[in-house]
Image: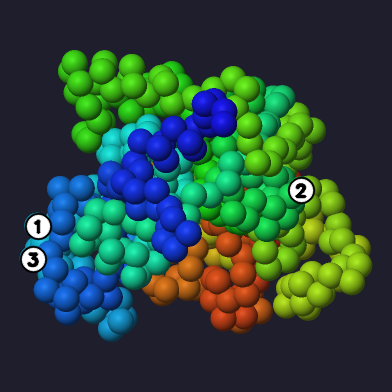
Amino acid sequence: MSTLRTLLDKVWDAHLVSQATVDTPATVYIDFHLIHEVTSPQAFSLLRERGLKVRRPDRTLATMDHATPTNFERVGDRVVIRDAAAAAQISALEENCRAAGITLYGLDSDRQGIVHVIGPELGVTHPGRSIVCGDSHTSTHGAFGALALGIGTSEVGHVLATQCLLLEKPKRMAVTFNGSLSRGVTAKDLILGLIAKIGAGGAVGHVIEYRGTTIASLSMEERMTLCNMAVEAGGRTGMIAPDETTFEYLKGRPFAPQGTAWDEAVERWRLLRTDDGAVYDKEVTFDASALEPMVTYGTSPGMGVSIGGTVPAANGDESITKALRYMNLQPGDALRGRPIEVVFIGSCTNARISDLRLAASVFKGRRVSPGVKALVVPGSQAVKRQAEAEGLDRIFKDAGAEWREAGCSMCLAMNGDRLAPGQYSVSTSNRNFEGRQGQGGRTFLASPLTAAASAIEGRIADAREYIS
């Protein structure tokens, strides 16, 4: 048996408590657990029913993001939550964290934000860590070389009680991107292009390790966008080996190692690379230099084409036929120029400061098209402060867009931000399933550049006409 190991192998082996048997999965130790208000209340109830305590509150961090409004209404210092279900979830999280001694960044905290935005920006996300959260897009943290997994509510309870998780080891998949991105092409286009190529099930059962010259040139925020959407290709998660870009991003952040501990950590992290000659179960190569801005046309992130492309024929694929019926599109329809009513710039995929800078570069000096509602929602309070310090909020507001508080917002119709039946949106989020942004709402996934240009034109637009 080969002793050469992939990045996944190295991180997996370092956290293995007990090997899988013919009857049971492996037991894996979890370094850090991120929780939020939607998938944690039932897990805490399970602990209370069984008389169990949170095993490692010091390895658990909570925030509020999914059900929280992003247009805050305050009474005194308190944010008012009008939705009864959301208010109950938020109240439960507050009480559960208080009782268990878990740090919570609530709506009154300057560290509040989308869980997969605040984890990296606070330095909680380290190379080589095992990280879980009751949310599919925990894969975001894999951009740092962490094994980051989305888990279900019952598993949230299991980790709270034991700090371990029962897992079947995924297979290894290498996706190698080579070449430089063309003008107007972003990391979001890169991942949409990949999923369009391999399909929404192309990575099922695998952990994707992103490699190649393109990856080496990306910023951490761009890498997070790629790993965020690994699950949309069916992957268990995504990973990227840490490098100098990773270390530069993490150094000095609140939860990053400090002083000599930092130097020691970096030495360990440099070893988190796939060994030369290690074998993957599946490999895909992708010429990034040939990619154009992407946009989806259907109800799966894998249903995507270039901005100048047309809706493809179903060719007997019932899923495409059903998607086109829902989207009210026909084979051969051009996507560019398609009228839209809403633009959403935000989510754990594209709500970081670099994403907002891209959007602002298009909005600056221009106006949102009449009849279009444009929401710009920062991923965290820290991102919001930075954007306001740079004057980006003023650019958005002067253009006629709404500038909101941090949260998941219209990524999912859970917090008051939703599409009306039949409305079309261009969204920088990660999912375009039926009803994802509101019952009967229709979603075109795209980059912040494409979303901003579409807001200006009131139709799906090519941002390359607005940037130098």
Q: Residue at x 30, y 81 (%)?
A: 85
Residue at image mark 2 = 197
Q: Is residue 15 left or right of residue 241?
A: left
Q: Position of residue 179 (x, y in %)?
A: 72, 25
Residue at image mark 1 = 101
- The three-letter amino acid code for the residue at tag 1 is Gly
Quadrant of the rendered structure where residue 314 is?
bottom right
Q: Position of residue 333 (x, y in %)?
A: 87, 64
Check disc 1: other Cα within 10 Å, few if <14, some if 14-19, many if 20+: some
Residue 229 visible in the current orientation: no
Q: Residue at x 45, y 41 (%)?
A: 142
Residue 283 visible in the current orientation: yes
In the figure, 15 relative to 333: above or below? above
Check disc 2: other Cα within 10 Å, few if <14, some if 14-19, many if 20+: some
In the figure, 119 relative to 468: above or below? below
Q: Is residue 458 left or right of residue 321?
A: left
Q: Tell me, yes or no, whether the two marked residues, 3 and 1, touch with CB atoms within 8 Å.
A: yes
Any mark on residue 357, and which? Answer: none
**Marks 2 and 3, the one that precedes in the sequence:** 3
Any mark on residue 99, and which? Answer: 3
Q: CA distance from mark 3 to mark 1?
A: 6 Å
Q: CA distance from mark 1 to mark 2?
A: 46 Å
Check disc 3: other Cα within 10 Å, few if <14, some if 14-19, many if 20+: few
